[in-house]
Amino acid sequence: MALRAGHTETGTFDDFFRREVKRLIWFAVRSGASRAEAEDAVQEAMKAVWERWEQIRYPQAYARRTILRFLEQMRRDDRRRDGAAAFVADRADDDCLFGEEARQVLAMLRTLPGSQRRVFALAMDGYSTAEIADITGQEPATVRSNLRHARQKLIALLGADRKART
């Protein structure tokens, strides 16, 4: 299965870094991280990509998989340390960084369960169901189900938002 362009289209690591760093930060934020957490996750992902640059065939997918793993580890560590039932990121810094529309989209995405949010964030980055399954380690049917449920919830939220405005 072809995930994304390999190194022939990716160029050097420096090219990859310059082209992907902002996209990866947005991916991490859409996946549920605060801006600070997203930057940490992207830093870890870029380090992992750099260390394995010659072995990685699909660096964009590898970086996203690494980000998802890093964020999941942060959630587990937070739960262990704080005994918290759910991962709650400090989002105060996000309010001054993002425009109103972006904040509304992120607020809607944050209402999704983590599994739906992650696959939806990958879909927003243009990955196919098969590619998302490969990145997340889920079955394609599970990815399709998560995407369907995420879309349904987001459509309902958009409808409720429109009603509230009228």
Image (cartoon, rainbow, N blue to C red):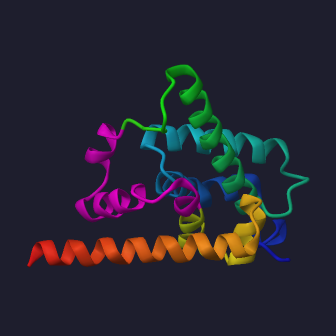
Up/down of 137 relative to 89, above or below: below
Percent across and percent down for residue 155 are: 36, 78
Percent across and percent down for residue 21 are: 58, 53
- The one of 12 and 53 positioned closer to us in this rendering: 53
- The one of 92 and 157 positioned closer to us in this rendering: 157
Residue shown at the point (27%, 46%) measured from the top left: 95
Query: Which residue reaches farthest right?
Result: 55
Query: Which residue reaches farthest left?
Result: 166
Up/down of 138 relative to 93, above or below: below
| Rendered-image quadrant of the C terminus | bottom left
Q: Is residue 4 visible?
A: no
- The quarter holding residue 16 reads bottom right
Percent across and percent down for residue 126 are: 60, 75
Query: Which residue reaches farthest top?
Result: 81
Task: Give the residues drawn in magenta, as a range.
Answer: 91-118
Percent across and percent down for residue 31 are: 52, 55
Residue shown at the point (51%, 73%) measured from the top left: 149
